[in-house]
Amino acid sequence: MVTQRPAHPGAAAFSSEAQAPETVDVLIVGGGVCGTALLFELARYTDVERVLLVERYEQLAQVNSRATNNSQTIHCGDIETNYSLEKAIRVKRTAEMIVHYAELLAPEVRERCVFRTPKMVLGVGAAECRFLRQRFTTFSPHFPAMEWLEKEQIVDWEPQVALRHGELRREELVAIGIRDAYTAVDYEALSASFVEQARAATCGSDRRLDVELGMTVEHIAIENHDAGHTQANGTPQDNTTFLVRLRPAKGDGKGIPRQVRARHVVVNAGAHSLLMAQQMGYGLEYSCLPVAGSFYFTPDLLRGKVYTVQNDRLPFAAIHGDPDVRAPGKTRFGPTALLLPMLERYRPASFWDFLKVLRLDWAVLTVFWQLFKVADIRNYILKNLLFEVPWLRRWLFLADARKIVPDMTLADLSFAKGYGGVRPQLIDKRQRRLMLGEASIQARPGLVFNVTPSPGGTCCLGNGAADVEAIANRLGCRFDRDRLAAELYGETAPQSA
Ligand SMILES: Cc1cc2nc3c(=O)[nH]c(=O)nc-3n(C[C@H](O)[C@H](O)[C@H](O)COP(=O)(O)OP(=O)(O)OC[C@H]3O[C@@H](n4cnc5c(N)ncnc54)[C@H](O)[C@@H]3O)c2cc1C
């Protein structure tokens, strides 16, 4: 069964630090979409007996996975022109796991989690149109739902995009469209559904999967460094356990700190995963560049998602327009890309955490210099700073958003206050480069720290499946790979034995 522990339960429910720590097989740190996806997969596809998920807020998915804090997109590589074909094919397989998962849900739950809309990537001007034409030829065999759209067809799909003052836009305009697919997702609702499904998978069994809210993981220590003996298959058995200190997040004296012993720890704490890894001496080869994203609302100008062609000199995705799944009748434009010295948006205290993971040295300065010396990037960073200046920001953003909706007016635009999270982009200090995807710091057997900038939401089940594989191999529990492959990858002929 899955139980949800209250934030500040009475002392009787807890063992104090002085008492023997309870033992769990797997401890998951962080109740965002990645932590909860892992909980679900452990519950449904393995027979692990004791799992504890610890989240420091009183509700799940209140940081980057919150519905208001990301672009609510299932990124599958068809309209994201910053993805190469190779990356798009890889991401598509993982992205489709969300859709397959949604098929397992009751219709009324599915409708809260995933959404069907049309989507397109728009080319404006001769160079972008040429680029899209070529991309369509290369990508469409792998993405059969892709349709080629000339101006006249774009009018049918998205009149506000193709028309200016009621006439077809003058400039060259084409698009690659996907008519009807699951394109949008509420990662917050998805997180809640993962916990519900985990509960359903263990209901009536002796297995215990606990979700503990309002509790911060303060410290992880290697308790028992035991390389163990060699298994029958020749691989060394590692029996190391971890002592984890938990502290009530509120600090109002009601909860009691305690320790937990875990056989395997997966840290899915967003940017804080890096901080926790570095506090243990791992992942020191990385620094972190937090890139916040803000959004702007308009009335419902678009029927589906409209992306634009990426400037390949810029490391961050261009702004796009998306119908907001939680705000019917509104379209959300963004995200911007603001360099912000914080690990968590709207939590100023996370500035100090940022300073800790920045680990400023010549390697980090070199990467900053490599970014700033490119005029496009420099101007982009400056523009994104100005996007945050009240009075000025709407004017500036309007100029960019008119590439998508040419008739948009200033009165249409309002800054989405309180929206937008922070993408923890890692800097690889050894290779002196900015990393764009997620990173998994495999600290040692049984201890992993996952850092998840975009498209981390899309990859939640894929990353979770990789962690489940490692957990099953190390703890020797049963893992029904065939069932996972059939249900989440949609494979009809199971590939594993
Ligand atoms: C502007 C923006 C737009 C984005 N758009 C998309 C998109 O369209 N599609 C997409 O796929 N991805 C998108 N992303 C990325 C996506 O939001 C993240 O990759 C995803 O939400 C990460 O999930 P997570 O569970 O790893 O992290 P989070 O959702 O950040 O969850 C981490 C959790 O760990 C908890 N935590 C931290 N430290 C501790 C501790 N010490 N103890 C206990 N708990 C702790 C936090 O409270 C938090 O709940 C976007 C991100 C941003 C910022």
Image: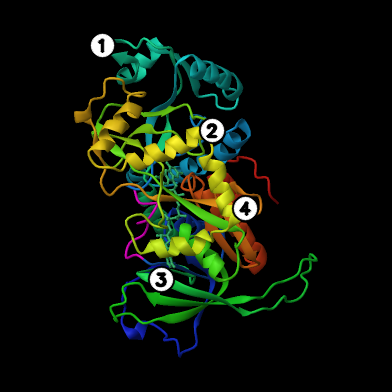
Magenta-highlighted residues:
57-67
Q: How many marks?
A: 4
Marker disc for residue 216: 3
* Left or right of 137 in this view: 211: left
Q: In which quadrant of the rendered view does residue 178 lie? A: top left
The one nearer the camera, 426 or 330, is: 426
* Left or right of 237 in this view: 277: left
Q: Is the residue under label 3 in contact with that under label 2 (CB below 8 Å)?
A: no
- Dot 4 corresponds to which residue? 481
Q: CA distance from mark 3 to mark 1?
A: 56 Å
Q: Is the residue under label 3 in contact with that under label 4 (CB below 8 Å)?
A: no
Q: Residues within 10 Å of mark 1 (few under 14, many from 20)?
A: few
Q: In which quadrant of the rendered view does residue 204 lie? A: bottom left
Asked if the beta carbon under badge 4 is closer than 8 A to the nearest atom of ligand 1, the reply is no
Tell me where residue 338 appears, x and y as whole percent: 40, 45
Magenta stretch contains residue 345: no
Specify the amino acid type for callout 4. Arg
Specify the amino acid type for callout 1. Gly
Q: Is residue 481 above or below residue 117?
A: below
Marker disc for residue 313: 2
Specify the amino acid type for callout 3. Thr
